[in-house]
Image: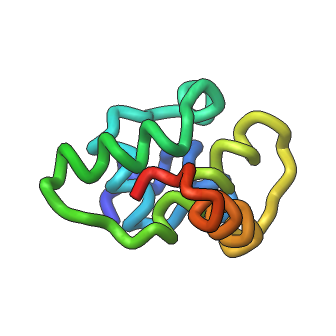
Amino acid sequence: MTSHTKQSELFALKNVGQATYEDLMKLKIHSIAALAKADPDELYLRLQKITRTKHDPCAWDVFAAIIHEAKTGIKQPWWAWTKVRKARQERGDFLI
């Protein structure tokens, strides 16, 4: 981990580790304020486009959790958002 990554405020979020941080950098999200304005659907789709890789839907769960924390300050484990995603998948209105 570089000193730049160690200093990022994004690491203060419950579900941001090195891999998520690197994804956020690819997505040009550099602050909690920027993350608070983001949409998990848009980030998930854009990450797949940028990396040209299909990502596990759990990546959406992480994005939803960290955006929620950025907006509200409420820390939840990313898997708390899995039920939200799965309900959307069952309704047919999830992205994939």
Residue projecting furthest to the front: 91
Measuring 84% from the left and 38% from the top, which residue is drawn there? Answer: 72
The chosen color scheme is rainbow
Question: Front-most of 96 and 20?
Answer: 96
Question: Front-most of 74 and 87?
Answer: 87
Measuring 68% from the left and 74% from the top, which residue is drawn there? Answer: 79
Pinpoint residue 95: horizontal percent, then vertical percent: 44, 51
**Is 34 rendered above or below residue 43?**
above
Report whether 78 appears left or right of 71.
left
Pinpoint residue 47: horizontal percent, then vertical percent: 30, 48
Pinpoint residue 31: horizontal percent, then vertical percent: 53, 33
Question: Front-most of 41 and 74?
Answer: 41
Report whether 66 appears left or right of 1.
right
Q: Quadrant of residue 65?
A: bottom right
Measuring 55% from the left and 35% from the top, which residue is drawn there? Answer: 39
Report whether 84 appears left or right of 42.
right
